[in-house]
Image: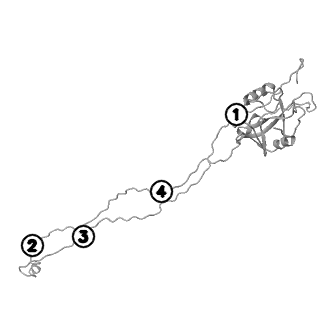
Amino acid sequence: MPFNKDQLDNLIGSNGDVVGRSGEKIGDIGLIYLDNTTSEPEWVTVRTGLFGTSESFVPLSGARIAGNDIQVDYDKDIVKNAPRVDVGKQLSFEEEQQLYAHYGLASTQSAGFETGDVDYNPGGTTVGYDTSGPTTDDAMTRSEEQLNVGTRSQEAGRARLRKYVVTENVTQTIPVSREEVRLEREPITDENLGAARSGPEISEEEHEVILHEERPVVEKQAVPVERLRLNTETVTEQETVSEDLRKEQIEADIDDDRTIR
């Protein structure tokens, strides 16, 4: 799977991804390691985890370029479970053998070295790795990882208003009135004697009285009682994140008993 220099330079500066055998994204392209003997691309590191803080080595054997991405011949789970090797320094022979064993590849006798965004040196050694070459100066740089924590907005759920009809029984008591018949008897007196004699002496008659009563009347009417709407408010909580950070330590090794000041 030959990659030329232009392809490597384009991949390093393209912010491309490493994708798996079936096309799923594994992570961002990190560094490309070259074989010391053949100067051919041998490994690519892929940044995974939160903010790309973890890097795994993937063999470039059987890989191909797909636009700005590198599609490797392995699934995502295999890559993420690869042995952890420090990125940014030359691979040791033992580290390479562990990686070869994990991916089921035959081992070689040479370890690769990295090429970065700027330096592409297929015939030399890693910048800053050798102690006597022309690429180093008289100072050593100490670096460390810093934790950059941020937030992003994502959909957490949905709320909606839904109106439906329920029926409940309402019972109320109201007073109702009715007329009842009561027979009243009054004796004949001087005052009503004339009214008593106004008719025939003997006769048959009927008197009718109409009785009335009240009955409950029920009438239903729909009236508005309240208005409801959905609104949102922001609630801030404290959430703790944890991540392992690497940092370099520098020690001075003196051959004699002189003190470093």
Of tags 4 and 2, the one toward the viewer is 4
Of tags 1 and 4, the one toward the viewer is 1
Say whether disc 4 or disc 2 marks the residue closer to the N-terminus: 4
Q: Which amino acid is tagged 2?
A: Pro
Give the distance between the C-alpha atoms of the residues marked 2 and 3, in whole angstroms: 28 Å
Residue tagged 1: 78
Residue tagged 3: 212
Q: Which amino acid is tagged 4?
A: Tyr
Vertical arrangement, residue 185 with respect to residue 42, above or below = below
* Circle on res. 187: 2
Say whether disc 1 or disc 3 marks the residue closer to the N-terminus: 1
Left/right of residue 169 with respect to residue 180 in the rendered view: right
Q: Which amino acid is tagged 1?
A: Ile
Say whether disc 2 or disc 1 marks the residue closer to the N-terminus: 1
Say whether disc 4 or disc 3 marks the residue closer to the N-terminus: 4
Would residue 11 be seen by someone viewing this image from the given angle?
yes
Give the distance between the C-alpha atoms of the residues marked 1 and 3, in whole angstroms: 95 Å
User: Whole-percent x and y of residue 20?
Assistant: 72, 39
